[in-house]
Amino acid sequence: MSTSSSDPMARRILLGLVAAALVAQPASAGLFGRKQPKADYAPVYAPPPPPPPANGAIFQAANGYAPLTSGQRAAMVGDVLTIVLVERTQASKSAASSTDRSGDIGLTPPSTGPLSFFKPSDVAASGGASFDGKGAATQSNALSGEISVTIAAVYPNGTYLVRGEKLLTLNRGDETIRISGLVRAADISVDNRVLSTRVADARIAYAGKGDVARASKPGWLSHFFSIVSPF
């Protein structure tokens, strides 16, 4: 087959593969890849209210009841509250050790007799050993900001399971903040805010990807040599 006849055939095959890829790609993927919330941090919506019982009463507690003392505080599955990130940790550790040991021995040979040919320097001995080691490590972390989450479950002891995430698409990169944990009803303020230090079993993740995050990491070849290097 000549070159002139093979080029249109190759072009048609290439166009067919591109068309098949576009058809197979979900509509929600978009041009920049799929950006769906992670299942573990997906928002929880309030369930629909049950039908009112036909008892003729005006007040129905099943439709949602909150005492006057709690105001508009989040208290039901699907309610939204805000976690105020005030994380700040600092740790340091140091260790040092030092040892020293020395010893000397000397013999004076007789000046007469069969051993008189030894010199004092021939039978003198000394030795010593020393060691000095130090180590130190310091680490500090800080995270501030706010993220709104939803109540995923309400437990009988008055604690709530909350979870949520925030996806930010900025210039040349994406930022993701995820948090989940247990919150006490007593720690929720009147404006539905909770400090992150009050969240039990907290799982907080802050990550980014894109050109900026990629530029701050070593290349794959440098990373490979840093793993296999014995030094």
Image: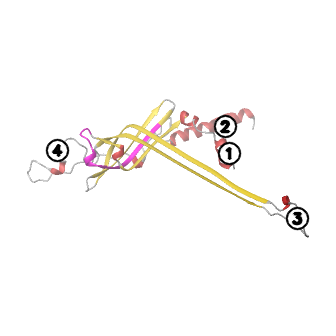
Q: Which mark is residue 10?
A: 2
**Label 1 neighbour load within 10 Å: few <14, some 14-19, many 20+:** few
Q: Which mark is residue 225?
A: 1
* In the image, residue 189 lies in the stretch drawn in magenta: yes
Assign a secondary structure to mark 2. helix
**Label 3 neighbour load within 10 Å: few <14, some 14-19, many 20+:** few
Q: Earlier in the sequence, mark 3 or mark 4?
A: 4
Query: Which residue type does callout 1 highlight?
Result: Phe
**Label 2 neighbour load within 10 Å: few <14, some 14-19, many 20+:** few
Residue 116 falls left or right of residue 59? right
Q: Which mark is residue 69?
A: 4
- In space, the residues marked 2 and 4 are separated at their CA atoms by 74 Å
Q: Mark 3 or mark 4: which is in front? A: 3
Q: Nearer the viewer, residue 6 or 121?
A: 121
Q: Nearer the viewer, residue 10 or 165?
A: 165
Q: Earlier in the sequence, mark 2 or mark 3?
A: 2
Image marks 2 and 4: residues in contact by CB distance under 8 Å? no
* In the image, residue 15 lies in the stretch drawn in magenta: no
Q: Which mark is residue 111?
A: 3
Q: Is residue 128 above or below residue 1?
A: below
Q: Mark 2 or mark 4: which is in front? A: 4
Query: Which residue type does callout 4 highlight?
Result: Thr
Assign a secondary structure to mark 1. helix
Image marks 3 and 4: residues in contact by CB distance under 8 Å? no
- In space, the residues marked 1 and 4 are separated at their CA atoms by 63 Å
